[in-house]
Amino acid sequence: MKTVIERAADGRSVYVTFSGGRDSSGILAAATSLAREGRIPAAVPFTYVYPGLTETHEGKWQDLVVRHLGVAEWMRIEVREGDNEFLGPRATHSLARRGLVFPATAHLWADMFDRTRGSLVLTGEGGDEVFSPKRAGALVRAGRGRFGAGTPRREALWSLAPERLRFRRASNRPLMDMPWLTDAAAREFWNDFLREEVHEPLCLRSSLEVQCSARTRAALAQTYTAMAAEYGSTVEDPFWHGEFLDSYIRHAPRYGYGDRTEAMTAVFGQVLPKQILRRSSKAHFNSAYFGRSAQEFARQWDGTGVDADVVNVEELRLALLQDPVPAPVGLLMQQAWLAQQSTCPDSGTAEESDHAREGV
């Protein structure tokens, strides 16, 4: 991983998107170690802080990592209420300029790249996919427990079953609760999801190869690379880099690790506190992304801008008025908002308007 980061930095300033979670902490640890060796400039963690939203607070975990690593500089941006919402000032400015892009949080990246112009930005993207247990996870855990009481024996055996049987079994699970989709769209989505799930190979290398080829992975990379270039910056996701993946697979068991903590400890056990490696909690940011602007839009929305064959308009409206709002509807809301605007996206300007940062 270090060679990937050093080559990407190429002498420029380095920032790490830092939430305090395990993935971003691991990236910060690797970059900080490189800086101490004099191979890159000091890595600066970049964090948005939402003072009034306790469910977003990661301060305890962030402070633990920063103190443990001895990080001297930390760029914390305090967010005013509503500024980072999916229809807040930054998001609507970005939508009007760029059009609809995936993911719905892309406007946050535009603001961050604006503040860190000309630098390398490192992310923890891919950590969930790389370190989470794979199809053989239950088999690994059961094997270590010698199939004794309390081990996932049934799941271990099912992981060895043919794909068609695993698909049939998975199809019996209740559908994901997505009432804003029409019945036909929800069924199609669920079937596609299950096919991807059961198609996962058994060995670690093949499993990660499938995940690397996912459409969401390619779409994320395309968005962030293009957005970073607007500000003379580059973005790197070390966990997705081929060199890191080859090294990780080479040193890992053939069928992967039994759980995420074991996988993270194998890679970062010498540089991160045990509390971080073992943590399972996560902050939640729905309230930071859906707020008054989402509710106001839902109440006045005329139902246009979405495909009625796919989206149940009234159910989507109800979802936007919920507390909390389901995270997957963010992009649909932005699509509907954009369709109602009279101005076209302006992609010819490379500079971000000062209005997108006003009041921060």
Image: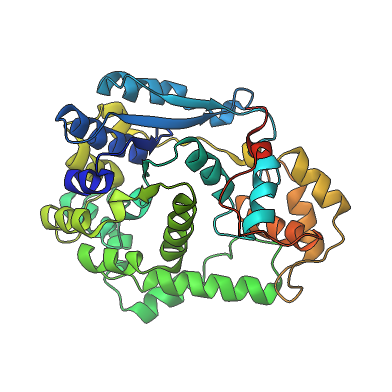
| Most foreground residue, 65 or 107 | 107
Q: Which residue lies most toward the left here?
A: 251
Q: In the image, is residue 183 above or below residue 296? A: below
Q: Residue at left 61%, top 59%? A: 348
Say whether residue 142 is left or right of residue 77: left
- The percent coordinates of residue 270 (x first, y second) are 16, 32
Query: In the rendered image, which quarter contains the C terminus?
Result: top right
- Is residue 221 visible to us here? yes
- The percent coordinates of residue 267 (x first, y second) are 19, 42
Q: Residue at left 30%, top 74%? A: 161
Q: Quadrant of residue 202?
A: bottom left
Q: Residue at left 46%, top 37%? A: 282
| Most foreground residue, 82 or 309 | 82
Q: Quadrant of residue 206?
A: bottom left
Q: Residue at left 50%, top 74%? A: 192
Q: Quadrant of residue 315?
A: bottom right
- The percent coordinates of residue 298 (x first, y second) are 81, 51
| Most foreground residue, 241 or 169 | 241
- The percent coordinates of residue 222 (x first, y second) are 45, 62
State the colouring used for the structure image: rainbow
Total of numbered circles in the picture?
Answer: 0
